[in-house]
Amino acid sequence: MKIGVVAVSSRFAKERAEAIQAWFDLKFPLGEVTVAFHPNSFDKSGHFAGDDAARADAFVEFANDPRLDHIWFARGGYGSCRIAEAVMPRLTEVARRKRYLGYSDVGSMLAILYRNGFNVAHGPMASDGVRNDPTGFRSLNWLRKGETEGLEPSLLSDPRPAVAFNLTVLDQLLGTPLEPDLTGHILMLEDVSEAAYRIDRMMFHLTSQPSIRRVAGIRAGRFTDVTVNEPDFGLTGEQIVQFWCERSGIPYLGLADIAHDRENKVVPFGPRP
Amino acid sequence: MKIGVVAVSSRFAKERAEAIQAWFDLKFPLGEVTVAFHPNSFDKSGHFAGDDAARADAFVEFANDPRLDHIWFARGGYGSCRIAEAVMPRLTEVARRKRYLGYSDVGSMLAILYRNGFNVAHGPMASDGVRNDPTGFRSLNWLRKGETEGLEPSLLSDPRPAVAFNLTVLDQLLGTPLEPDLTGHILMLEDVSEAAYRIDRMMFHLTSQPSIRRVAGIRAGRFTDVTVNEPDFGLTGEQIVQFWCERSGIPYLGLADIAHDRENKVVPFGPRP
């Protein structure tokens, strides 16, 4: 089995790829699972891992390559919304048979892939694997085997389809051609390094959308490294999610075990298999 | 003539109100124009100038009060999106005869007021007046007399209806009940203290909206105090606006003389009088 790693967002360092390679070598000493990095992913264009055309080409090539079984996004940062719409019409049936894993900025990719019936999950990036924490390996097991052991625990008792997003990333694709139909879905939200007033403003925006009012309910993941607010905002990220659910009439379903941290659990999109 | 000053966003300090009072006394020593502050505006509720009910009540009371001629928003920060929808049905014909001035966070109020046919302009807050710079007095002259001397200069040669917004604030009201119909409008955008990658992501979101694709064109105001990006993003705020106009097919109309600075010019919403 071979996993393709490709960068669609911020610059991706060669040293980071080497660390990922070493992690795979350690986890699979007999070469049961190997990893391939798209050469474009080491390009640099200002903020990005190559310009939009280079990143789009890299993703399309890897997604359509029959020698690669599944795709793990290299890292987040920012940039995948710039290519998500353009790559979709270029994907073949080969691409449709793969699983795709990542979170944070690549939520834009997950959104449009899920909208088009692809098999995606919200979980750490390949770059996070090298921290050598449990979430990396759990997620890789979903990616390579569709394994459901490391899943977000509420999924085990609730059969409704689910999705998970970084709040900021979902907030910024609402109303665009990337937005999937989330009618009847459980929506899990997490974020990192945002100020409380921004979380509040995004929850206003999100819960005011007629499309989002059709979800089955919202779960609050962890909001970590919240930027200091002066004076104190008065609500945590989780409380802000609950506040806007109550105000908008969207059922608040409690906490979700997702975040930009080593405890994060995997959330495959859609109905349970 | 009496101007009502009311806080609908972040906390508003008594000292700031005293400075605004002193500025009015200096500018209008014969009492030709006086100023009144709503007592609720000095409330404190966490981040906000009182809780949502107190801020909404204050705005509605001042807007509907026949003894006040026009309304100047006290200051920005964050919070007006939390009350904008709730106050609209409570406004009377008295409120409809007034002019409303502010920018930044109160863009949420300008949006829903304009959507409902009220007379609003994008310009500094009452708090900015006390810097004693030209934009404060120019804007006050629009507020008290509808004067058009301090207007954004492109308005003089282009008869199409115009609006101006802080990019972040407009971005966060798209698709909500606050969003006005901007079909055929010139849309001017400015922002302060945002990172380039955030400006880029917001312009993706904004220009991907079917509603925004119907504007006559976009002008880029100044993007000031842009948060440092590592590595350098490669485009200025103005260049990012132009990039997304070109990509989305929205006409890019050049620069606009608006910003969170002392050079800012006033933009009354809608068609020229």
Image (cartoon, coloured by chain):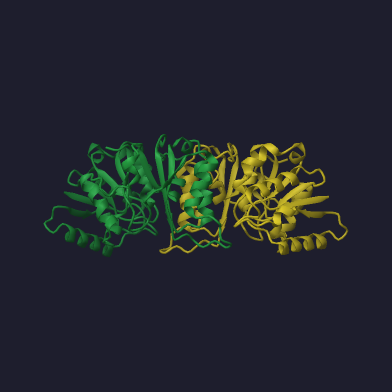
Chain colours: A green, B yellow
- Residue furthest to the right: B30
A40 left or right, relative to B104? left
Q: Quadrant of residue B10?
A: bottom right
Q: Check the picture and name the quadrant holding the C terminus of chain A.
A: top left
* Residue B68 percent coordinates (x, y): 80, 47
Depth order, front residue of B169/A205: A205
* Residue B89 percent coordinates (x, y): 67, 36
Depth order, front residue of A174/B227: A174
- Residue furthest to the left: A30
B202 versus A42 height, above or below:
above
Residue, x 39% and y 48% (percent of image)?
A: A256
* Residue B5 percent coordinates (x, y): 74, 53
* Residue B135 in view here: no
Q: Quadrant of residue A25?
A: bottom left
A99 versus A28 height, above or below:
above
B57 left or right, relative to A218? right
* Residue B190 in view here: yes
* Residue A232 percent coordinates (x, y): 56, 61
